[in-house]
Image: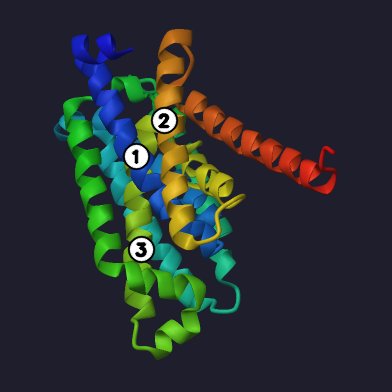
Amino acid sequence: MFDLLIQYEWMRNALYAGVIIGFISPLVGVYLVVRRLSLIADALAHVTLSGVAAGLLLQKEVAWFQGVNPLYTGMFFSLAGSMFVEKVRSLYRSYQELAIPILLSGGIGLGVVLISAADGFNVDIAGYLFGSILAVDEGELTLIAGIGILVVLFFLFFYKEMFALSFDEEHAVLTGISRKIINLLFMLVVALVIAASIRVVGILLVSALMTIPVAASLQFTNSFRQTLIWSVVFSQLAVFSGLFAAYYLDWASGGTIVLVSVAILLLILAVKRIVRIFRRNPVS
């Protein structure tokens, strides 16, 4: 296992990218789950697909764009989608969940149109849909690392504000916290994490890495801090195990990482049920 890291640069890039994404995805996911906004990750992921498709189309049709990584156009679309979400949520205060199906359907529709307009690409778009962590290059790793730093800085500076808005939004506003600005910044952070996670788990699976480790940790933790810590632990475990299993078994890396996350959740549910049975019927 460690010989691979020493011998192959692409394996080191994959591991570094996985560690970063395995840290920032549940970090953002905890707040999404607590605020009941988990599906927004799916919506922004499909908008990102449209951005990637637009980037691939521009590569095919415009010579200047041939050297531009489609991840950058995907990131641009994701950021634009996050601002659209906040705008719709502000327009429909009593029906904020409307932003999710609008963005989700619009993202899918635009992506399908752009892909059909290109009449096929010169690259394997499945790598963007399902992840291709073993293909991460130095430029993409630098991008992922930069996004990771921005995400960590955001939560370091706005931890108290995010905590207050997540659990008692009205009281937080009364204390002087700018709900509109913090929510917009948070959605931009979510968009960046989704764009960065594409290479690791893919557009169609990105929300899984954000939410499944959180779901697992919620089964036994008693505080927000514990949930945050254990979510990161489970996410890192899934990334490490999934990455090496995918290499040795020749499986898709993104799907393997997500399956490991699901297995961790199922294991915790099973252990919790067994413990509950023994507490009800202790062995004499």
Q: Which mark is residue 181?
A: none
User: Which image quarter is the N terminus in?
Assistant: top left
Q: Hey, which quadrant is residue 80 in on the image? A: bottom left
Q: Position of residue 156 (x, y in %)?
A: 26, 62
How much space separates mark 3 and mark 1, taking CA atoms?
Answer: 17 Å
| Relative vertical location of residue 160 with respect to residue 220 in this rendering, above or below | below
**Left or right of residue 187: residue 88:** right
Q: Secondary structure at mark 3?
A: helix
Residue 82 seen from this side = yes
Q: Secondary structure at mark 1?
A: helix
Q: Which mark is residue 21?
A: 1
| Relative vertical location of residue 173 with respect to residue 101 in this rendering, above or below | below
Q: Nearer the viewer, residue 44 or 282?
A: 282
Q: Which mark is residue 186?
A: 3
Q: Residue at x 32, y 75 (%)?
A: 181
Q: Position of residue 262 (x, y in %)?
A: 59, 34
